[in-house]
Image (tube, grey):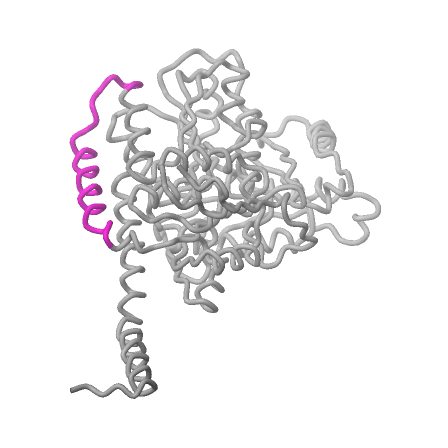
Amino acid sequence: MPNSDHTRTNHTDTAKLVNENQCHMCMPLGGVVAFKGVEGSMALVHGSQGCSTYMRLTNVEHYHEPIDVASSSLNEKQTIYGGEQNLMKALDNVRRVYKPKVIGVLTTCLTETMGEDLNRIISTYKAEKGEIDTDIIPVSTPSYDKSHTEGFWTATRDIIVHYTRKDIAYHKRINVIIPHISTADIKAIRMILDTWGVEYTLLPDYSMTLDRPFAGKYMKIPDGGTPTSAISEMSGAPVTIQFGLTCEKNISPGHYLEENFGVPLINLPLPIGIGNTDMLMDTLKRITGKPMPKSLGYERGWLIDAMADSHKYNASARPVIYGEPELVYAYTSLCLENGSIPSVIATGSAHSRLIPALEKLLEESDCDEYPVILEGADFSMIEAAALEAGSNIAIGHSGGRLLEEKHDIRIVRAGFPIHDRVGGQRILSAGYGGTLSFLDRFTNTILEKKHSSYRELRKQELLSKIATVTETGFTAE
């Protein structure tokens, strides 16, 4: 059992007036990524040009793809008199230039503070234009309230709310709803589902729109994404698998489908690590009535073999794990499985269900050291906690690079955004194979640090002994 007098800090324990090097990004940015996972869609940010530029740059630096995000381009005048006319003009321009099937309109801090009524403005726009062939979906994403994690879940839920209806006939295609993960992890989950031979609708699917093969030609709206026709049929599915253990109910897409259409919800952790991936396999076994495919069985065996090989090294690690709640939970469970007791677990989100999920996980793992848990954290809090707890490795996105630069706490990069390395979209951790890939990166980072300082540490140790001999006047016979 964890130590009963463990230290825990969360956003309610520490009065902070500012974020210092924040651990999360703004809420509409998460909404932009969700809309990139819908076929033929375009995201339009109702706010200043600076907001949409920030979202474009952050996504481009991570995915290394040309990513368009439209803006209603508000300035001082609209801040006083309202931005309705700008939004209507922006909708006209986006429809004319991009010809999208879907426009996701996301609010910003500015338009939320102004009190812009998106639903009324869009209703007025539709009434003025008559019949249009573009679906317009408003999403409220005030950044001063929540993070990009909640923006992603909220937008995904609102997309489902927009399309689903009650008159859909029952069918056999299951729903699979994912959190904000790398495109490599989306492909890994698709591979698992395909290997099992199940029919499914995966939402949002940005595996092609944000990581597309070279085609030699710029596409304003790239191919890929979940078709809207498939989304509209999610209300007739036999079951929803949602990788959203830490997602609050009020923004949970799977919970909405269950509450409004009676689609049973199976809420699972991300399939990272043996236990979490086994849960997905057991679920698919129950749904399909078939045994696990032999190829996945081999992958599981290779992973266990790798865990046996690396356990002796990983036991020396005291990782600080930070980032989006769902990834943080998954990496924590993997570290516990392989003998690395986390020293600090942190997320920038202040609205997830991460803490109760972690408490249950830590209790079940029966570890004898209890990590510091930070919710709503920034990197000043994470840095202080990591130094006090003696963290010697980190798992997380590029925001934590100062841990590496200032304190030589090396980072195994994972999550979003990765902007100081290439290939952030190709970081693979999901499934047995993805877990093995992550485990090798983690273990090799430990070994790299050990070997880079081993000789110097032994030298210092020897010099220290010589100095002691000289002080005591001892001479060898």
Query: Which residues make up the magenta segment?
Result: 286-312
Instruction: Quadrant for residue 391, please give it.
Output: bottom left
User: The N terminus is located in which quarter?
Assistant: top left
Above/below status of 77 relative to 132: below
| Quadrant housing residue 175 | top left
Q: Is residue 201 visible?
A: yes
Q: Looking at the image, which is closer to me, 336 or 448?
A: 336
Secondary structure mostly taken by the magenta-highlighted segment of the chain: helix
Front one among 474 and 324: 474
What residue lies at 30% left-to-right and 60% top-to-bottom? 446
**Which residue sits at x=70%, y=42%?**
87
Q: Is residue 354 magenta?
A: no
In x, y percent, where is residue 118?
71, 34
Residue found at x 45% / y 21%: 234
The x, y position of residue 415, in whole percent, is 43, 49
Quarter of the image containing the C terminus?
bottom left
- In the figure, is residue 265 to the left or right of 158? left
Position of 161 relative to 185 (above/below): above
